Amino acid sequence: MQQQLMQSLSDYLGSLAEDKRIDAINDFRLLLHKHSPFRDHPVDCVLWVKSNKISPNDYNPNHVAPPEKRLLLKSLEVDGFTQPIVVLEDKADHFEIVDGFHRHELGKGRAHLKNKLKDYLPITCLKNERGGKPDRMAATIRHNRARGRHQINAMSEIVRELTRAGWDDARIGKELGMDSDEVLRLKQINGLTELFAGRRFSRAWTVK
C-alpha cells in the first residue's frame, strides 16, 4: 500500500509544472507535519516560498563582519542552504524573519543565487501562539546570541522596548538568556530615567 501510494505521488508530482509542483510539495509537507510525532519542532517542516513573501524585521541587532559574510556566501554557493530562514507568519501568506536575515539578504540579493534558487527561499515557521512583537524580538535574540555579535546600542533599544511592553528584568533576562547585571548594563545605556522608572527614591536620588 505504501509503495503504491508513493508511486502515485511520484507520478502526480512529475505531471505538474514546476511552480505547481513546489506548491504541491509544500502542501504534502504540511500534511506530513500535521501527523508527525515531531510537529512541535519547526524544523520538522521546511517550506520553499517566493522571496518576496519574506521580509526582514526592523529590530535585529546582530552584526556579521565582512569576512564572515563572505564565508556565508561561499557556504550558500558550495553547500547550498543547510539552515532554513526562521520566520513567523505576520499576515496571510507573508512572513517576517526571526532568524536568518543574512541568509535571506544573500539568497534574495545575489543574482546568481537568486537564479539558482528560482527566487525561492527555505523557511521554517515558529508557532504563532507567541507572535507579539516582544516575543518575536526575544526569539531573534535567542537565535542570535550563540552566533555573531550584537550591536550594543541596538540591544539596549530592544531591552527598553521590552521594558515598555511590561516585561520586568527577570523576564527579560530569562527570555534573552542574560543575567541581571547584563540587563542592568543595557538599561543604563538608555539613561537613569529609563533604568529607574517606577521605582521609589529618597530625595537624594530623585530622577529629573
Image (tube, rainbow, N blue to C red):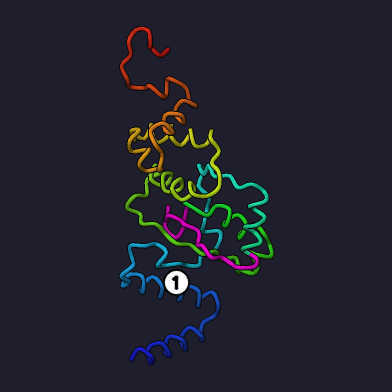
Where, by quadrant of the figure, is residue 195 drawn? top left
In which quadrant of the rendered image does the N terminus lie? Answer: bottom left
> Residue 114 placed where, x, y %?
64, 64
Tell me which segment is drawn in magenta: 77-96
Q: Is residue 149 left or right of residue 203?
A: right
> What residue sits 44% from the left and 20% below the top?
192
> Residue 92 placed where, x, y %?
42, 58
As rendered, which of 4 and 64 lies closer to the eye?
Answer: 64
> What residue sits 64% from the left and 69% below the top?
116
Q: Quick check: is 88 in the magenta stretch?
A: yes
> Residue 187 placed where, x, y %?
44, 28
Q: Residues within 10 Å of mark 1 (few under 14, many from 20)?
A: some
Looking at the image, residue 195 lies above or below residue 95: above
> Residue 175 placed where, x, y %?
37, 43
Where, by quadrant of the figure, is residue 108 drawn? bottom right
Q: Secondary structure at mark 1?
A: helix
> What residue sits 39% from the left and 42% below the top?
134
Looking at the image, residue 154 lies above or below residue 96: above
Q: Residue furthest top?
A: 203
> What residue sits 43% from the left and 85% below the top?
9
Q: Is residue 138 left or right of residue 102?
A: left
Q: Quick check: is 30 in the magenta stretch?
A: no
Q: Amino acid at mark 1?
A: Asn
Task: Give the labeled residue for mark 1.
Answer: 26
In which quadrant of the rendered image does the C terminus lie? Answer: top left
